[in-house]
């Protein structure tokens, strides 16, 4: 295991921000991590765990030891006639893992196709798309405590999953290095196609018999048509969460803005489409230097080349303030600001 110093993180974050790490290392096994815990660079510095760097905005050089998680391996740990428990190491690329499951006809993750990043980060914000979140198939995860080196297993309830939320963003922030995630998948998958766009896309694809591979392909097609590919334009997906408001606020807004896009929630609140709020604030495609609001999806902020992390952050503040002034609604950043 080598620890390098003064390393550019540009290739390691999907915004393509050229910030530098004071120290940088790659870990390939839990043993590597335990060895790393003994090093002076680990003990004398703050640490930042890095997966695919697809949900972070680097606003300054990282005066810390950056630990790139490259733990690999996918294995079946338990199997019944109906169910299979698959344990995936944290450094596996998420989409490749989803493809592995689809190939074996293990259902549950197909709606989450093409989400960038690594499996180890998937519980951090309980990744979700097209009507499914990982909490729906999550079984347990293993993580090493950042100070004691002890391995702990977290059950689903201990992770406290919510919409783009988990205990690892709050109570246990920076306290654990996730090493693997185990999912409970189905050999007789139930299909989740209630999300309108999926049905339409499946129809356009002329699918005669529904299967998880077709659903995955439909999701890939939809995503590719509106989300910018980070290999071409720097971004970290949705920059803000879709805000939740009370029924009273929703009805007040709906009276004033009849085209408001919103979804009712079980608790009688409503989730508003932040992309709609931003577009209606006149900001879709708004650009300051190389920092911009994406032309096709206003919830996504992009770097057209040489924007700094601070320029993107300042743009996000402008978006927050403009939406607040027009709708009185406070957006919350979804991306991790470093
Ligand atoms: P990173 O950005 O590397 O890390 C994210 C956070 O997790 C950081 O705080 C990091 O320190 C921490 N972390 C990472 N790995 C570990 C670990 N092993 N142990 C402890 N902490 C760790 N997200 C969705 O939910 N739904 C979407 O539909 C979606 N679409 C996207 C589309 C695009 C084009 C892009 C660029 C992003 C999208 N995202 C989406 C966001 C992102 O892909 C996910 O949040 C993903 O899980 C991040 O994984 P990562 O490995 O890149 O995490
Ligand atoms: N909309 C607009 N203008 C825009 C963008 C969206 O009016 O510029 C409106 C449209 O009416 C659209 C609605 O907002 O019907 C919802 O848009 P979309 O289906 O694109 O989804 P989203 O709410 O913008 C969320 C997630 C995505 C996830 C998709 C699909 C959040 C913060 N974002 O986006 O996740 O892929 O749904 O399920 O919940 C991510 O987290 O990084 C991410 C990309």
Image (cartoon, grey):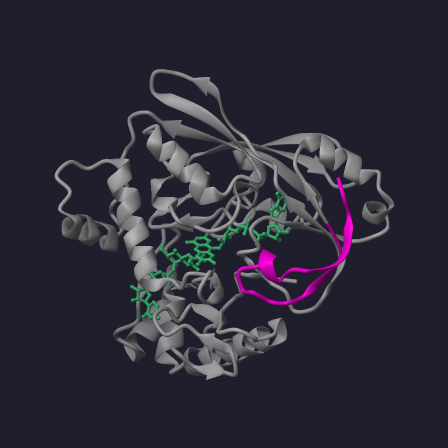
User: Horizontally, is 260 left or right of 319 in the view?
Assistant: left
From this viewpoint, is residue 107 visible? no
- Where's residue 30, x and y in %? 68, 32
Query: Which residue is farthest top?
Result: 81
Count of numbered labels shown in the rendering: 0
84 is higher (above) or lower (below) than 21: above
Query: Which residue is drawn at the image coordinates 28% and 33% (left, top)?
Result: 190
- Where's residue 121, x and y in %? 56, 46
207 is higher (above) or lower (below) than 84: below
- Residue 178 falls in image quadrant: top right
- Residue 91 falls in image quadrant: top right
Placement of the C terminus among the 4 image quadrants: bottom right
114 is higher (above) or lower (below) than 330: above
User: Horizontally, is 267 left or right of 173 in the view?
Assistant: left
Query: Which residue is drawn at the image coordinates 52% and 45% (left, top)?
Result: 122
The quarter of the picture showing ligand 2: bottom left
Task: Reply yes or no: does residue 105 show up in magenta.
Answer: no
133 is higher (above) or lower (below) than 285: above
Placement of the N terminus among the 4 image quadrants: top right
Query: Which residue is drawn at the image coordinates 34% and 16% (left, top)?
Result: 81
Task: Reply yes or no: does residue 12 show up in magenta.
Answer: yes
User: Horizontally, is 54 left or right of 261 in the view?
Assistant: right
- Where's residue 36, x and y in %? 78, 39
Closer to the camera in the image, 186 or 58: 58
Magenta highlight range:
1-24
From this viewpoint, is residue 280 visible? yes
- Where's residue 160, x and y in %? 55, 42
Closer to the camera in the image, 249 or 243: 243
User: Horizontally, is 13 left or right of 114 in the view?
Assistant: right
């Amino acid at each position: 295991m080598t620890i390098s110093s003064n390393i550019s993180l540009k290739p390691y974050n999907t915004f393509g921000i050229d910030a530098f790490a004071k120290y940088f290392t790659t870990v390939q096994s839990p043993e590597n991590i335990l060895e790393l815990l003994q090093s002076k660079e680990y003990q004398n510095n703050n640490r930042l765990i890095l997966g695919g760097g697809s949900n972070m905005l680097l606003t300054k050089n990282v005066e810390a030891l950056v630990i790139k998680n490259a733990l690999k391996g996918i294995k079946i740990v338990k199997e019944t006639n109906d169910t299979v428990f698959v344990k995936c190491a944290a450094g596996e690329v998420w989409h490749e893992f989803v493809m592995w499951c689809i190939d074996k006809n293990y259902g549950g993750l197909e709606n989450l196709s093409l989400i960038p990043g690594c499996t180890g980060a998937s519980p951090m914000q309980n990744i979700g798309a097209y009507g499914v979140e990982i909490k729906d198939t999550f079984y347990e995860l293993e993580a090493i405590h950042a100070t004691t080196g002890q391995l702990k297993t977290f059950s689903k309830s201990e992770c406290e999953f919510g919409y783009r939320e988990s205990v690892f963003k709050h109570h246990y922030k920076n306290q654990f290095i996730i090493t693997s995630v185990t999912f409970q998948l189905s050999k007789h998958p139930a299909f989740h196609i209630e999300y309108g766009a999926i049905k339409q896309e499946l129809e356009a694809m002329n699918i005669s018999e529904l299967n998880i591979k077709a659903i995955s392909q439909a999701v890939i097609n939809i995503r590719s048509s509106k989300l910018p590919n980070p290999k071409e334009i720097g971004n970290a997906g949705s920059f803000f969460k879709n805000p939740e408001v009370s029924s009273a606020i929703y009805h007040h807004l709906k009276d004033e803005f009849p085209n408001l896009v919103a979804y009712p929630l079980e608790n009688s609140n409503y989730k508003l489409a932040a992309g709609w709020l931003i577009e209606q604030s006149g900001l879709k495609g708004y650009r300051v230097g190389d920092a911009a609001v994406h032309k096709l999806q206003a919830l996504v902020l992009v770097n057209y080349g040489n924007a700094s992390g601070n320029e993107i952050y300042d743009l996000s503040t402008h978006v927050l303030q403009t939406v607040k002034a027009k709708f009185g609604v406070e957006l919350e950043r979804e991306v991790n600001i470093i």
